[in-house]
Image (tube, rainbow, N blue to C red):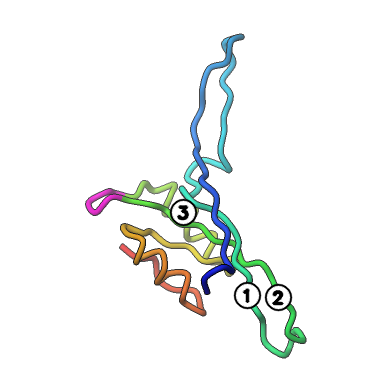
Amino acid sequence: GRGTTRLWRNNTGGLIDRQGRLVRFGLCKGSSDLIGLRSVKVTTAMVGQHIGQFVAIEVKAPQGAIRPEQESYLQLVQRFGGVAAICRSVEDAEHSLAMARPMPLCR
């Protein structure tokens, strides 16, 4: 729900520093534009504890294509129980975060 999710911009890429060395930045190649955590209250099997669930949102324009490494990253997040989505609007992101269970990647 609102207030239980924190997302951060994850710029990825590389630049040449003043000494001519390549410096890479961002989480990893293919990682999503927005990454973060959301608080999830788990079932009674875990005595009502709150856990942090990893969130990865790939932001795309209406006709934007997803690269294979981005698709692989999102699938990995889902396999580990995180929320992973391709979002083309704020509404897409809100819907993805509202889902209680892992969902197929939005297109």
* Residue 71 x %, y %: 42, 54
Badge 3, how many Cα within 10 Å: few under 14, some, many 20+?
few
Secondary structure under badge 3?
A: helix
Mark 3 — residue? 72
* Residue 41 x %, y %: 65, 80
Badge 2, how many Cα within 10 Å: few under 14, some, many 20+?
few
Q: Residue at x 28, y 50 (%)?
A: 61
Q: Compare residues 63 and 69 and report the one nearer the observer.
A: 63
Q: Is residue 34 left or right of residue 40?
A: left
Give me the disc on residue 92: none
Q: Amino acid at mark 2?
A: His
Secondary structure under badge 2?
A: strand
Q: Quadrant of the C terminus?
A: bottom left
- Magenta span covers which residues? 61-65
Q: CA separation, marks 2 and 1?
A: 5 Å
Q: Nearer the viewer, mark 2 or mark 3?
A: 2
* Residue 77 x %, y %: 54, 61
Circles 2 and 1 in contact, beta carbons < 8 Å? yes
